């Protein structure tokens, strides 16, 4: 019984994600993890690195995680053979405005991560992507390299100005390859 006036709060996963999990063909020497990879900037803001991913960009490009995505430690991500596993499913959850991933982890390469998960500790995750350019949230400068960044992105990344505007790099066409 719920106390009158109490709230019940739950996380919500999409039907397509739950269907994938239900039909997943598991490999004996692998483990699987569900990860909330990143969320739409319009609802959650930019990440701690100052990157902002618009909802439409996540809808359009989240499947690049499946095509290109591997699981690496500390962004050592040049050689997929050195990865701990790969992204086997990517889903944009329209209600929660986030990208949800299923990772397939090679047990022999990810024992430390699996130990954390087994003990109830959630390892921090970070994604990597390639973008053709960053767009400044303040002046709309398009920069193909950091050398082309405006002063806003160079000097004030993640700063909130007195008029309420926040400085961040908008990523409109991300190709995700690293988690």
Image (spheres, rainbow, N blue to C red):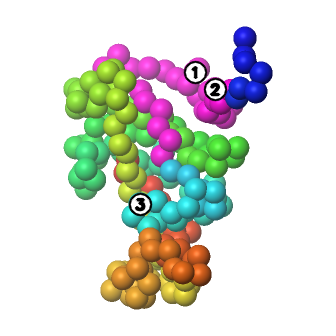
Q: Nearer the viewer, mark 3 or mark 1?
A: 3
User: Marks 1 and 2, Cα distance to the nearest angstrom?
Assistant: 6 Å
Residue of label 1: 23
Outermost residue toward the right in this view: 4
The residue at which mark 3 appears reads as 48
The kind of secondary structure element at disc 3 is: loop
Q: Are marks 2 and 3 in contact (CB under 8 Å)?
A: no
At horizontal 37% and vertical 33% (from top left) the residue drawn is 122
Quarter location, residue 150: bottom left
Q: Within 10 Å of the Cα at label 3, are there few (<14), some (14-19), or many (20+) other Cα atoms?
A: few
Res. 135 in view: no
Task: Give x and y (percent) for residue 127.
Answer: 40, 52
Which sits earlier in the primary sequence, circle 2 or circle 3?
A: 2
Query: Left of 176 or right of it: where is 1?
Result: right
What distance separates the C-alpha of mark 3 from that of mark 1?
A: 35 Å
The correct choice, above or below, for 51 with respect to 34 in the image is below
Tell me, yes or no, whether the highlighted magenta stretch contains residue 29. yes
Residues at discs 1 and 2 in contact (Cβ within 8 Å) = yes
The crowding category of the residue bearing disc 1, from other C-alpha atoms within 10 Å (few below 14, some 14 to 19, many at least 20), is few
Q: Is residue 126 magenta?
A: no
In the rendered view, would you say 76 is above or below 10?
below
Instruction: Please name the residue that numbered disc 2 is placed on.
Output: 19
Where's residue 39, x and y in %?
56, 52
Looking at the picture, how far across and down is residue 5, in whole percent? 76, 27
Dividing the picture into quadrants, the one containing residue 86 is: top left
Rendered residue at 40%/79% (across/down): 156
Range shown magenta? 8-37
**Residue 31 image-quadrant placement:** top left
Q: CA distance from mark 2 to mark 3?
A: 32 Å
């Amino acid at each position: 019984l719920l106390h009158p006036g109490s709230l019940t709060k739950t996380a919500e996963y999409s039907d397509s994600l739950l269907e994938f999990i239900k039909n997943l063909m598991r490999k004996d020497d692998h483990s699987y993890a569900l990860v909330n990879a990143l969320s739409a900037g319009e609802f959650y803001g930019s990440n701690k690195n100052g990157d902002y991913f618009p909802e439409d960009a996540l809808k359009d490009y989240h499947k690049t995680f499946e095509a290109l995505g591997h699981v690496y430690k500390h962004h050592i991500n040049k050689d997929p053979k050195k990865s701990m596993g790969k992204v086997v499913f990517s889903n944009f959850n329209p209600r929660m405005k986030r990208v949800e991933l299923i990772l397939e982890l090679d047990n022999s390469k990810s024992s430390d991560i699996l130990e954390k998960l087994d003990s109830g500790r959630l390892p921090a995750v970070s994604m990597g992507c390639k973008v053709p350019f960053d767009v400044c949230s303040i002046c709309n400068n398009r920069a193909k390299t950091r050398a082309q960044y405006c002063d806003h992105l160079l000097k004030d990344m993640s700063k909130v100005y007195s008029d309420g505007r926040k400085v961040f790099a908008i990523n409109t066409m991300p190709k995700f390859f690293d988690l």
